[in-house]
Image (spheres, rainbow, N blue to C red):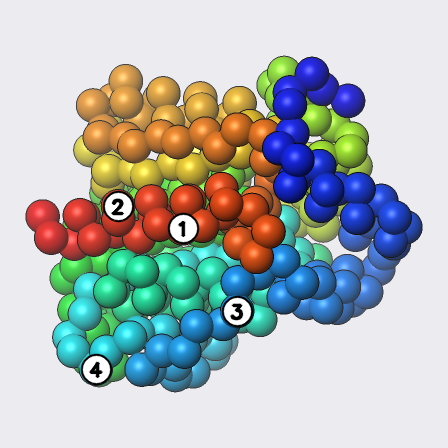
């Protein structure tokens, strides 16, 4: 265990998890882990706020495969849009696991949110999720108007693995001449290997564990490909002129050091960065708004960053 001080509420959540004595995701089959993630979703989430628009639709992946997407908006006006990419180690997660969070971001920001159900590993290994995210981003710029959205005012965001995909989308957008207003990176992974000090400090007992990270990544990507920047954006040749970033991190998270390192890399390249580290909470904290005041604070900050970006 680390000397970092968990908040009483966060410590209570972890104690509750221990008392349940349920097997971790990495001790399950992939279908079992997916079902367990969905089943646990609403226990700590804020209630699903009602919105004026919630619509499911399909867009085509680069290979023609239909990809499910869901639009969240609290008005029928022509709104700017956040492409949201869910977390889950590239292996688990879907609309249901991130429905409350996407609703909150749409409600608090006044923007539209489009959540993408990108294809998951191990059925679809790296770089399938990356290519699906890129295609969705370009689809919104080309065809967002068909949903009444302003695809010229576009941001990308995500948590955990989705934060990785969002960072990679921002680099790809720059390389393809697509203008983004913001990249919203919530507890993202950015490094090729679990080598930072925080991976050691929080390897066990802090929700996301070292064994779990390896389980996710082994399903998603061959070890020899991990230095590809599309998996580890910290290794990109350049991050100059990518979109401004809002980076939200958890202090007691194995990924916190690489999140800070990526924010520092962006700043060193002259990219505007807003960085907030929420003390005493773990990975996935932003989805625990029923219990953690830090989750509501992070959701409010993310929404304000989106508002400001779309007003520029």
Q: CA distance from mark 1 to mark 4?
A: 23 Å
**Residue sitting at the far front:** 8
Q: Nearer the viewer, residue 199 or 64?
A: 199
Q: Name the side, left or right, on which 30 lies relative to 265.
A: right
First along the sequence among labels 3 and 4: 3
Label 3 to label 4: alpha-carbon separation: 22 Å
- Can residue 267 be seen here? The reply is yes
Q: Which residue occupies 84% across, 59% down? A: 29
- Residue occupying image coordinates x 58% and y 71%: 96
Residue 90 appears anywhere in the view: no
Badge 4 local density, few (<14 within 10 Å), some, or many (20+)?
few
Q: CA distance from mark 2 to mark 4?
A: 22 Å
What whole-number distance in Å separates the C-alpha atoms at marks 1 and 3?
14 Å
Identify the mark nearer the N-term, 1 or 3: 3
All told, the count of numbered labels is: 4
Q: Nearer the viewer, residue 280 or 284?
A: 280
Residue 202, quarter of the rendered image: top right
Residue marked by disc 2: 305
Going 35% across and 30% down the picture, which residue do you hit? 275
The residue tagged with tag 1: helix, strand or loop?
helix
Q: Quadrant of residue 135?
A: bottom left
Name the residue carrying label 4.
Answer: 76
Per the image, the residue denoted by label 3 is 47
Q: Where is residue 3 shown, x and y percent of the image?
A: 69, 16
Sequence-first disc among 2 and 4 = 4
Q: Position of residue 131 (x, y in %)?
A: 44, 57
Q: Secondary structure at mark 4?
A: loop
Give the number of the disc on residue 299: 1
10 Å neighbourhood of mark 3: few (<14), some, or many (≥20)?
some
Alpha carbon distance from label 2 to label 3: 23 Å
Residue 44 is marked as none
Does the residue at mark 3 contact the one at mark 4 (Cβ under 8 Å)? no
């Amino acid at each position: 265990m680390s000397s970092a001080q968990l908040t009483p509420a966060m410590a209570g959540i972890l104690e509750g998890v221990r008392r349940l004595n349920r097997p971790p995701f990495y001790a399950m089959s992939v279908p079992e882990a997916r079902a367990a993630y969905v089943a646990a979703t609403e226990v700590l989430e804020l209630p699903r706020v009602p919105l004026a628009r919630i619509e499911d639709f399909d867009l085509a992946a680069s290979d023609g495969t239909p990809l499910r997407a869901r639009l969240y908006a609290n008005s029928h006006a022509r709104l700017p849009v956040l492409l949201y990419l869910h977390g889950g180690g590239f292996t688990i997660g879907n609309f249901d696991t991130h429905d409350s969070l996407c609703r909150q971001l749409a409600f608090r920001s006044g923007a539209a949110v489009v959540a993408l159900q990108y294809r998951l590993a191990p059925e679809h290994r790296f770089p399938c999720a990356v290519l699906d995210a890129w295609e969705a981003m370009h689809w919104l710029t080309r065809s967002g108007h068909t949903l009444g959205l302003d695809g010229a005012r576009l941001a990308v965001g995500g948590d955990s693995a989705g934060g990785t995909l969002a960072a990679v989308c921002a680099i790809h957008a720059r390389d393809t001449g697509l203008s983004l207003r913001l990249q919203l990176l919530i507890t993202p992974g950015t490094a090729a290997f679990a080598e930072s000090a925080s991976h050691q400090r929080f390897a066990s007992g802090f929700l996301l564990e070292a064994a779990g990270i390896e389980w996710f990544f082994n399903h998603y990507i061959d070890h020899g490909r991990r230095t590809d920047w599309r998996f580890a954006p910290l290794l990109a040749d350049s991050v100059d002129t990518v979109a401004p970033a809002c980076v939200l991190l958890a202090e007691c998270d194995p990924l916190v050091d690489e999140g800070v390192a990526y924010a520092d890399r962006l700043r060193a390249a002259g990219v505007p960065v807003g960085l907030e580290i929420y003390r005493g909470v773990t990975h996935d904290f932003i989805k625990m708004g029923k219990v953690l005041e830090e989750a509501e604070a992070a959701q409010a900050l993310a929404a304000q960053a989106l508002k400001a970006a779309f007003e520029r």
